[in-house]
Image: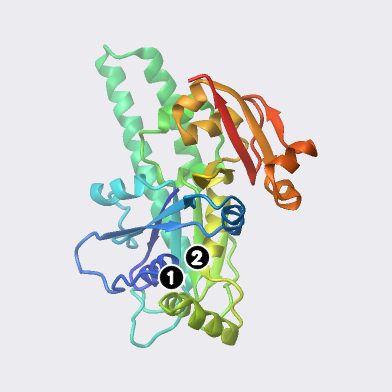
Amino acid sequence: MKLGIIGLPQSGKTTIYNALTRGNTPTTASAGRIEVHTAVVDVPDPRVTKLSGMFKPKKTIYTKVTYADIAGLEAGSAKSGISGQLLNHLNQMEGLILVVRGFTDDNVMHPNGTVNPVRDAESMLTELLLNDLIAVERKIEKLAEERKKGGTDKALNARQTELFEKLNKTLSDNKPLRSMEFTNDEQKELASFGLLTRKPILTVFNMGEGQSAPDAVLDHPSVALMGKLEMEIAQLSPEDAAVFMEEYGIKELSLSRMINLSYDLLQVQTFFTVGEDEVRAWTTKRGASAAESAAEIHTDLQRGFVRAEVVAYEDLISLGSMNEAKAKGKLRLEGKEYPVKDGDIMHIRSSL
């Protein structure tokens, strides 16, 4: 999973990045430069820890999420299209985390003069939408020019024109492209065409101590957290962090909460492989088949898929061993079309 963190200057975007990654990246950006800071974070999952204790493997591997702190997005930047360098970074992300400032700080001026998180959220979402609208209109113009010149694939041109006209109508109605449903062919058509409002997005309201989330009506998930406080906690030892969290009544750090929200955002889930050599967590799309999930481990396992031996995590833990799970009929044989469930423990049999 790869998620890009974006937001206005002075929104606390890098603070949120540091809280998520337990990093110490400077929170002041260099003027005039597009900077991208990236960190790969283990996904905390107590199920992996429990399975590792049961099998005592040589290696224990958690799933990972990549967070990229992307600087450079400002109000008005989409009027002529977001710059190519910045757009290239954004297009590499599977989803976006929009950080909106809700805290007040006399030492950190807001670029718009006043703190208004709802205004800023709407402003940034409009920037993304305008960027897509400009790109779609340019594509429609290019397709029209190709028709006039002739010599192009008429069927392809007609198909693309119809698709991009639909995109244009949705964007012109001030709706993001993620509100649309696309066929498999249309998704393939758009895969190489960077459209930011197709990406799932999560808005983070970065609040000060004692503040609650603003009353905002968004078409996507949002969460409020105290970025500065959580960044400070992230720098502490586990023991000191526990004391600090108890003092402030914080039950869960943003890292765990945001990763859970990231999973929901990207519609992915976790399955496990276990053994004496390795206990490992994998991510796969929700609703993916056993064969499709096998490809996450290795493409050869999908190509040569014979069957999957499957047991639910809860069943294995309650019964205490694979032998008991098999004796109680909880270890099942499933075919390639079996829809994998979150927490499934699988062993793939392959002919290759």
Residue on which the image places disc 1: 19
Q: Amino acid at mark 1?
A: Ala
Picture quarter containing residue 335? top right
Q: Position of residue 310 (x, y in %)?
A: 66, 36
Depth check: give the residue in front, 57 or 183: 57
Q: Which mark is residue 255?
A: 2
Viewed as shown, does residue 166 lie left or right of 48? left
Q: Residue at x 50, y 40 (%)?
A: 170
What is the secondary structure assignment of the residue under circle 2? helix
Q: Residue at x 31, y 31 (%)?
A: 141
What is the secondary structure assignment of the residue under circle 1? helix
Q: Position of residue 300 (x, y in %)?
A: 45, 25
Q: Amino acid at mark 2?
A: Leu
Whether residue 70 is visible here, answered yes or no, is yes
Depth check: give the residue in front, 38 or 270: 270
Q: Which mark is residue 289?
A: none
Q: Is residue 60 above or below residue 21?
A: above
Q: Is residue 103 above or below residue 180?
A: below
Viewed as shown, does residue 154 lie left or right of 199? left
Depth check: give the residue in front, 189 or 24: 24
Viewed as shown, does residue 39 lie left or right of 233? left
Q: Position of residue 262 (x, y in %)?
A: 52, 54
Query: Distance of mark 1 from mark 2, alpha carbons?
Result: 7 Å
Q: Position of residue 281 (x, y in %)?
A: 53, 47
Whether residue 208 is visible here, answered yes or no, is no
Label 1 close to label 2 by CB (< 8 Å): yes
Picture quarter containing residue 41? bottom left
Q: Is residue 227 above or below residue 203?
A: below
Q: Residue at x 31, y 18 (%)?
A: 147
Depth check: give the residue in front, 234 or 118: 234
